[in-house]
Image: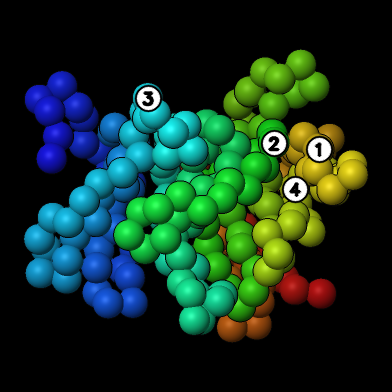
Amino acid sequence: VYTEEQEYLPTETAIGPNGDIYVADGYGSDFILQFSHKGEFIKKWGGHDNADENYNLNNAHGVAVDYRDKENPVLIVTSRSDNSFKFFTLDGKYLKTVSLPGAYVCRPVLDDQNLYSGVCWSENQEGQRFSDSGFVTILNGQNKVVSNPGGEAPQYNNGKLQKMYQAKKPIFNHGHDVFVDEDKNLYICQWNAHHTPPIKLERV
């Protein structure tokens, strides 16, 4: 499956509707590996230097099965260093990219029709990534950003999302994960955040 030179440092798994297992090698070689429910290897895709650049992944930190269209579930894969989520069929065919300029997103978290993600880093106006930064981004069922807790409000120009930034008064240190409870409150897990507990955001 891998050459001796390729690293394998997985960061997340997802389970498909038929029991297939998807592994995101987000800190290794950036492949998505698909296994049967018995653990038998089926295929891999992603990585780097593909003839079709749509298949390239750059820090494939997360993977999730998107059941928002119950008749047609798909995979959402993080390409964090590209500030994007990429969508694939369950057998690895590329569908589309949702670009999130300025947002180094972690894993996709789905609840009802919304898609949530912690943003691990933010950039300044000069495009420099800086420490103790990040926010949370929330997309609706059409994969349009509707809110950025801890960040500036999303702006669209002629339907194109403009670069997103952390709020001028920081709230989060490297938002790394989001949990949504039954009352739709959010719990934000932070990385490298000086041993702070998750932050709870109550629904209003």
Amino acid of disc 2: Pro
| Camera-side residue of 89 and 163 | 89
- The reply to whether callout 4 and callout 2 are in contact (CB within 8 Å) is no
Query: Which residue lies at the image location 74% right of the left edge and 55% below the top edge?
Result: 145
Q: CA distance from mark 3 to mark 1?
A: 27 Å
**In the shown orientation, is residue 162 left or right of residue 118?**
right
- Of tags 3 and 2, the one toward the viewer is 3
- Of tags 4 and 2, the one toward the viewer is 2
Q: Position of residue 167 (x, y in %)?
A: 80, 40
- The reply to whether callout 1 and callout 2 are in contact (CB within 8 Å) is yes
Q: Position of residue 124 (x, y in %)?
A: 75, 23
Which residue is tagged 3?
Answer: 49
| Camera-side residue of 104 and 52 | 52
Query: Which residue lies at the image location 24% right of the left edge and 68% below the top edge?
Result: 20
Element under disc 1 = loop
Q: CA distance from mark 4 to mark 1?
A: 17 Å
Whichever of labels 4 and 1 marks the residue nearer the N terminus, that label is: 4
- Of tags 4 and 3, the one toward the viewer is 3
Crowding at dot 1, Cα within 10 Å, few <14 / some 14-19 / many 20+, comes out as some
For residue 150, the mark is: 4
Residue 31 higher or lower than 132, as above or below:
below
Crowding at dot 2, Cα within 10 Å, few <14 / some 14-19 / many 20+, comes out as some
Residue 60 higher or lower than 146, as above or below:
above
Q: CA distance from mark 4 to mark 3?
A: 35 Å
Element under disc 2 = loop
Residue 98 visible somewhere in the drawing: yes
